[in-house]
Amino acid sequence: MKTSNFVPLALAVTACLCTTPASAADTVSDYPNRPVRMLVPNAPGSSVDTLSRIVASKLGEVLGQQVVADNRAGAGGIIGMEIAKAATPDGYTMISATTAASTVAVLLQKNPSFDPVKDYDYVAQFAETPNMLVVNPSLPVKSVKELIDYCKGKQGQVNMASAGSGSQSHLSGAYFMQAGNFPSLHVPYKGGGASVASVIAGESHWTLTPAPAVMSYVNSGRLRAIGHSLPKPSPLMPNIPPIANTVPGFDYSGWQGFFVPKGTPKAITDKLRTALIKTMEQPEVKKLLAVQATEIVIRGPAEFRKVVQESMVKNGKVIKAVGLKVD
């Protein structure tokens, strides 16, 4: 009796063991069979939003399913990062990870709610973005030196706009003021789009913000670009000098890539990475990112994780140097 009862049970277990890998394989081969959500931890109109949507449009074509942008701005990117951390790891949620949301925001938390190095699986980095120093065209400055001198002469009456406390534009602007030894009043807005709009409207006088947030306005003459944050001249910005030409050693730019929730099947993450690489090779994508003064840089999971780790160290030093408070 014991033997006859055991045999069907053993066969059932064996059948489960045999069919489970096949089912998993079917899931991967069938992926994606519905739209993929791309969390954007920034407001619409921000640099992160701009680049994310350029890539998402073409990535969806490569995957054969729409990649839908889901803006979850707030708390310097923390809200979006927390949603991504808690999402189901099935390949249908990814997050557009950036310097500010992934490293700056968490460094400003007294009790961090996520760890950018350990709490996510990495797809790939796809871009490096310089910060662009722009002013309202009515401001009587046409160079980095002239802006510094103008701010010194006005003694705190010149406004610097940022996308909010702890944002990349806040940190880069504060670091620039500290390195250039000049005063300006920090005016935080709710997102990159709002902060850039304030400079266009003349409510604020300048901002040092990721290039994709401002290049269309620079090209149309609504903003004047007077410097960028890369340490050397760039062919993407041939007529705009590095801030480092005036403030020696200044170097503060950002990166962007995709994370997925921890535990996402490796085969799915690999499929996403292959699709992303193919997407970034398309001439139209290259052209669109060049217009945004953004360099395409592909780094796989291990290299990308190292970039994030190094970013944590560098931003920790910058936060300390400019005296930002940890909440």
Image (cartoon, helix red, strand yellow):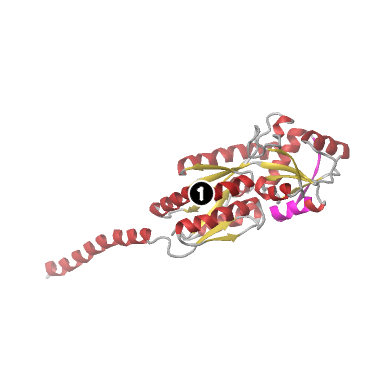
Front residue (pair 133, 261) = 133
Position of residue 239 measured from the top left corner of the image (x, y, whole percent): 71, 37
Q: Residue furthest front?
A: 283
Residue 321, placed above or below residue 28: above
Q: Which residues are magenta?
A: 182-199
Front residue (pair 84, 192) = 192
Position of residue 304 measured from the top left corner of the image (x, y, whole percent): 50, 42
125 relative position to 266: left or right? right
- Is residue 189 found inside the magenta-colored segment of the image? yes
How many residues crowd mark 1 within 10 Å: few (<14), some (14–19), many (20+)? few
- For the point 76% across and 38% down, the residue is 177
Position of residue 120 measured from the top left corner of the image (x, y, whole percent): 49, 51
What is the count of numbered marks?
A: 1
Visible residue check, residue 121? no
287 relative position to 10: left or right? right
- For the point 19% across and 64% down, the residue is 10
Quarter of the image for residue 33 reads: bottom left
Residue ID for mark 1 = 282
Residue 80, placed above or below residue 118: below
Element on which disc 1 rests:
loop
Front residue (pair 30, 104) = 30
Front residue (pair 116, 51) = 51
